[in-house]
Amino acid sequence: MSMSPLHQPFIDRFDESESPVRVFYAPGRVNLIGDHTDYCGGLVFPCAIDSGTTMLIRKRQDDKVKLASMNFELMAALAPDELNQKYGDNWINYVLGVIDQFRQRGIETTGFECLFSGNIPNGGGLSSSASLEIVTAFALNQLFDANFSDIELVKMALAAENDFVGVNCGIMDQYAIAMAKKEHAMMLDCNTLDCEQVPLKLDGYQIVIVNSNQRRDLVDSKYNERFEECQQATRDMQKQLDIKQLAEVTPEQLDANLHNFSSEKVAKRAKHVISEHNRVRQAVTALTNNELEAFGQLMNESHQSMSQHFQASTDIIDKLIEISLASDGVIGARMTGGGFGGCTVYLVAESQVENFIDSVGKRYKEVCGLTADFYPIQSDNGMRELS
Ligand code: GLA
């Protein structure tokens, strides 16, 4: 029997049963550099963080699927024929999307009941949804001996989000959350899925995540809009160059073809994607060579590009970045993830972290009227069963 502190809440929510309870876990992730490149076949550089989603699960004697969460009141009890339709507009759809992928691959699970508990800072940008998808995919694979490979589970979780939930996201989050290695960040080529685990040697520096707590409105629709603009940029370049994905365009080819985009806006999106893809490689080289200031500088440039060319930042986030960069010991600052509010990530000298939290918190409140949350984070491993 599991020793998880969630065991009792689990037992309390469901009927008596002899079936053993198993406990699974998947972390959240922070992307250090390389945003809005994944769905353009580019490079990304995320690591898993030390908060995530825990899932307790056991088989039922009947064919019902019962889903509960410590974070939300909503609880669902579904018959098999109710599993393939959306359940309102909430967290349950991420789980249903994954079940749907198992079914599409011929795995009809018998009934089960599960309880989720997440501690990923909310507010967006740290992939709480991909964490939920991956922990579900991993747990169902184990519980029902489905024998899908890790990479297949990643693809199933991604398809759940793309097809069932309806967000055109790329593969970064699901991949990172599944495959992460503690004390490493991964340089993933989202075209080939080649992945290099790079030691996160941050001697004397700390990764700090700051949640702006700016309300994120219509994020999914803005994300899909950017996705479409990048598709357009790709089609524009395909008329000129022999490429499949936008990230294949070199900076020189971009410069030579700026007049060949269908609009100024589409050209700006392409400028971001192509420069960002190249920044990831430079950043990884800098990190490997212990050039942390150069790494930080690339983070700063990444933010400028996200803000100016990709227009995925907000005035408040830009202000937060500006305030943070003025604080002692900060060598890198950028928004992280999809954007349009949410979380930002920093490299801060360890000796200055306390001061950073204090001074940036105060100044941000004064200038923007919002209270930020600060999370100095450690890297972590990917999906796993907890013993
Ligand atoms: C979200 C998506 C990812 C990626 C980032 C931006 O997190 O889920 O696939 O596109 O935005 O880099």
Image: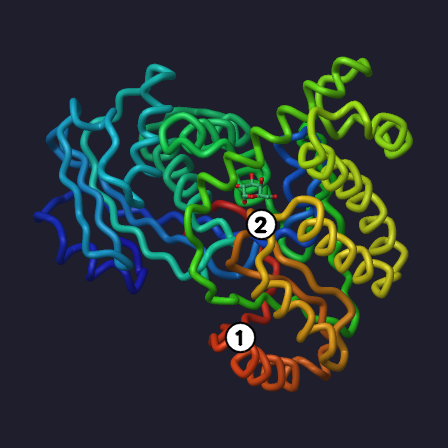
- Does 113 appear above or below 110? below
Q: Is residue 368 left or right of residue 346?
A: left
**Disc 2 marks which residue?**
337
Q: Are the residues at dot 1 and dot 2 in contact (C-beta closer than 8 Å)? A: no
The residue under the point 56% across, 58% down is 49
* Disc ID at residue 368: 1
Q: Is residue 314 left or right of residue 27?
A: right
Q: Is residue 379 left or right of residue 154?
A: right
Q: Position of residue 21 (x, y in %)?
A: 25, 47
Residue 385 in view (yes/no) = no
Q: Tell me if mark 1 has few (under 14), some (14-19) or many (20+) residues whose alpha carbon lies within 10 angstroms of its own.
A: some
Q: Amino acid at mark 2?
A: Gly
Is the CB–ligand 1 distance for label 2 below 8 Å? yes
Quote the CA–CA distance across marks 1 and 2.
21 Å
Q: Is residue 96 left or right of residue 133?
A: left
Q: Amino acid at mark 1?
A: Cys
Tell us which disc is closer to us: 1 or 2: 1
Who is closer to the viewer here, 56 or 200?
Answer: 200
Tell me the SS state at disc 1: helix
Is the CB–ligand 1 distance for label 1 below 8 Å? no
Q: Position of residue 109 (x, y in %)?
A: 26, 26
Residue 363's image quarter? bottom right
Q: Position of residue 260 (x, y in %)?
A: 79, 23
Who is closer to the viewer here, 326 or 151?
Answer: 326
Who is closer to the viewer here, 46 or 380?
Answer: 46
Tell me the SS state at disc 2: loop
Ligand 1 located in image quadrant = top right
The residue under the point 76% across, 60% down is 300
